Image (cartoon, coloured by chain):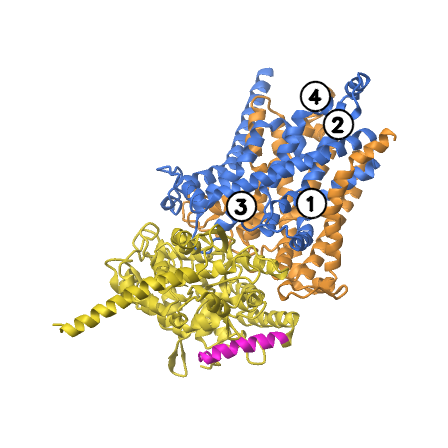
Amino acid sequence: MLTKNSKKVLKYVGLCCIVILLFGQFVYGAEKPQFKGTTITVMAIAEAYARGFKMFEDEIAQKYGIKMKFDMTPPQDAYSKAMLQFATGRSSWDIVLFMPANLADYSKHLEPLEPLIKKLGLNFYLDDIMPVYRDIYCSWEGTLYAIPWDGDQHNLYYNKEAFAEYGLTPPTTWDEYDKIAELLNGKDWDHDGKREYGVVEAWQRGGYAFWWWMDRFASYGGIYFDEEMNPLLNSAGGIKALEHMVNITPFVPPGTLTFGYPECENAFIKSDAPMVVQWASTGKSAMDPTASLIVGKVGVALIPGVIIRGKLFRRTTLPTGWSAGIPKYAQHKEAAALVLEYLSQPDRALKICVDPKTFVDPWRVSSFNLTKWLSLWPGYESYTEDYLKVMKKTIELGLPDLQIPGSDAYVKAADAEISAALIGKKSPKKALDDAVKAWNKITDRYGREQQKEYWKAQYTAMQEKEIVYIPYEK
Amino acid sequence: MLQRRKTKNFLTLILRYLILIFFVLIALFPIIWLIETSLKLSKQYYASPPVWIPNPLTFYHYKLLFTTFGAIPYFKNSLIIAFANMVLVLIVSIPAAYAISRYKVGGETFSFWILTQRMLPPIAAVIPLFLLYNKIGLIDQHLSLILSYTIFNIPFVVWMLISFFNEFPIEIQEQAMVDGCTELQSLIMVVLPIIAPGLVVAALFCFVFSWNELMMAITFTSTNAATVTVLFASILQSPTGVWYGEASGAAVMAIIPAFVLTFFFQRYIVRGLALGGVKG
Amino acid sequence: MTRKWRARIFVIPVLVLILGITIFPLIYSLGISLTYYYLPAGISPVFVGVENYITAFQDPEFWNSLKITFKIAIPALFLEFFIGFALALLLNGIKKGRTVIASFLTTPVMIAPAAAAMAFRLLYHPEYGPINAFLSVLSNKPVKIDWLGSPNISFFSILLVDVWQMTPFIMLILLAGLSSIPEELYESARIDGSSSFQIFKYITLPLLKLPIIVAILIRVIDLLKFFDLVYVLTMGGPARTTETITFFTYFAGLRFFRVGYGAALSFILLFIVVGLTSLFLKVTKLKEIA
């Protein structure tokens, strides 16, 4: 029961609200400039990323008069294309999606966001962004240069039916992982009359083998360099990590050495392999009945860990990911900032993640709200719950990518050595020794002192999140 | 005796045909498979054993190609670039080839020097051209590719045209000049119409070479001037999905000019491919 | 002004284009190849002399790419030449349907190498590809050859695509040569009682010398530029087993931005091509024949 007085108050409050809303709308409209006829170009990498922009294309055109054009340059080329233009002070794009691994290089050419936020009165709800993405994947030496677009990470996905039949639970250590791969290989665990494989990974040339090796190396406490810029790849944990990979080579489908993300995912969702470490979008694809043969049979878990000094140690990885920044040389910087603000509002960021066709994974704290996800896979609520839980935990435990200049060159050099071990051309130790040599060469080429500074900047940011090197001993 | 020999000849002839048909199958199969894949539902190209005949046929991938993947600008760019390059190459090559053929301008060394341009590994030009285009703002402009493709098209067309001009009976042209034409007029009004079929083939080759090119296209363009080869290279390398149907569709569309050329201009292809260097 | 002088004006546009788009960039590139030039840092090139060339000769990856280029080029050239020659001889022996068959056989030649690579990516797929399916039927047991992913096969799988595409090219050139040999030559040889082999050896081969040389020369040059197939099929993998020199140079120069190094590598490749071609021309005395 409301008293008369309180009713009055309510009325008053209501009136105030309406006035504020109206007035706010007015002020809002006055403050945000109109950009009628402006077309911004977005380096969008792939359809599944561009889709997030396209979902709100009409709304944005209506609200601000801004149109969008998309550049689908694949990730392998995106960095070099952008850098080559930036180097001469040009940019075809107003918004670039980029891998945070290249942030050190990009940061020199991106517009810091704080001044834009102040000038245009934008609100990106920065406190609502998962800290590692905000502070490490979008900021360089404390300055914010970008807003996350896709919160990438590696999780473990497995075929529950196959696991149940052999009485297995998802592996918690890499040793178990290897054993399960061996056990299920060559068995017809989906009863389609053909023998299947034990596990699948993506080892394609150009970074994949390195990322899948990093999954293990991170679990062994490994990071990229020590404080003196000596590569740690060939440390005891690194060698163990590569031995694990070599162990499973007999149990992966043919073609694994050429598999990238899509082929690897495909082998899992077409029921050729019962277990896979993959980006979170595989968790969506596996539930898509138009592509997947294992809808409803998927389980998700953290990637395995390692027993270090008698305790299970877990450190996950956050490979690639995509951040969205505005080049200094862009023609329509303010329009681009408005578009980014519009798309990254918590409700829209969530909408983009929940859409089954985008490969965008959540990066806002508020995006992990279970109730908003339940509509995605009706009938599979427990999977949805696990999916969100695992993603969130993975981000909290995650080791970020190497971000210093030349990170591409480092990754590809190590990648080539790791594959040399996978095809049996080199022993794991020899391969990683050679990778260390290659890394030192790259460091010298880019200037050792300068690289050391960059690495220090990244390592400091990592240490603030308590991500430090833990030497592995049995 | 004669009878036996005839039978033997007949049998070898049959064998010849059988072997040739076998190779025709090998030559065509990959292309047929590409077309089939572009018309299959994705369930059918992820099938083991493979589905040999798509059922049902679907144009879904083409639809996606032209809507979601926005293929039309890529085709437009390819057309603009290949066509403009063709026109440019013809305009500069016809007079040059004529002068070399009729007046031996620069002697054998010069014509051979033009031919040697074709040996140039494209990568040797791509790196500096990239830096230069970048400096003058030609990156992602149609002009960058229109100019770059002259590197391999000019030597080709000049050499092909030289052989046409060499075969052209000089008397016809001289007659026209006696009748009051200037040399340029006689070239345009008399010589070119007669060698027109050859010109068309040279032009088409130019067109197809430009249309097919990958390395320069992926290096110099990104949105504004990206070509068809760029489109399917990027679909194929899409980090987020295996778009085999769409990539196959794009590849099918990309081989159409080549098909037209092979089937309608078969007679001239030999000469074209031999770079005008083999004098039959 | 004499006619010859006027004719010289005719070649000026071509000359200007070649100088502008090829020669000037090459000279510029030669300059760049003598510098350290890392683009993203936004610094100007630093002169380092021939350091990049020395680095190349000490770089095992460079030697590896060179080795792989020849590992692909040599078998490809042999297969293309012998199959192409055989097909030309077969075609030359028939009259009915010759044009049609030749048309069908030559379809692969003109299509974009990247499109050909796309087609073979589908054919080579270990699970869903028709090649393994066909082999499985033949051998009556499941065949799962990893055409592009196994280090010992991938280079061969790539060169097979080139063989598929370019064999008809050699066939066409040789066919043109064959059909220009007058029938009377064969007739008189047969009347003299020469065997088919003798006719081939003493009439056909010598008269085909020029087309053979031209065909091989063009193929050698193109095989050294090998890029598109690698780019679409394997990206140089697995490990570095299909990384050709053009591919390696492309990555060094335009992906890792060792621009100076890339330029130096491209010059080394240029010298190899020019060297091989002139050697070839000298040995075969092509200029004199033509």
Dot 3 lies on which element? helix
In the image, A145: left or right of B82? left
The percent position of residue A31, horizontal first and vertical second, equals: 43, 62
Q: Whole-Å distance between the Cαs marked 2 and 4?
A: 28 Å
Amino acid bearing label 1: Ile
- Name the side, left or right, on which B125 lies relative to A422: right
Which residue corresponds to mark 4? C183
Q: Are marks 2 and 4 on the same chain?
A: no
Few, some or many residues within 10 Å of mark 4 (<14, 14–19, 20+): few
Q: Secondary structure at mark 1?
A: helix
User: Which residue is labeled 1 in the image?
Assistant: C221
Colour of the chain lettered B: blue
Say which chain tag 1 marks. Answer: C
Residue for badge 3? C117
Magenta span: A450-469
Q: Report crowding for label 2: few under 14, some 14 to 19, many 20 or more residues within 10 A (C-alpha).
A: many
- Depth-wise, is mark 2 or mark 3 nearer the camera? 2
Locate residue A464, reporting x and y percent.
Answer: 46, 80
Instruction: Name the disc covering residue B165, or none.
Output: 2
First in sequence: mark 1 or mark 4? 4
State whether residue C202 appears in this view: no
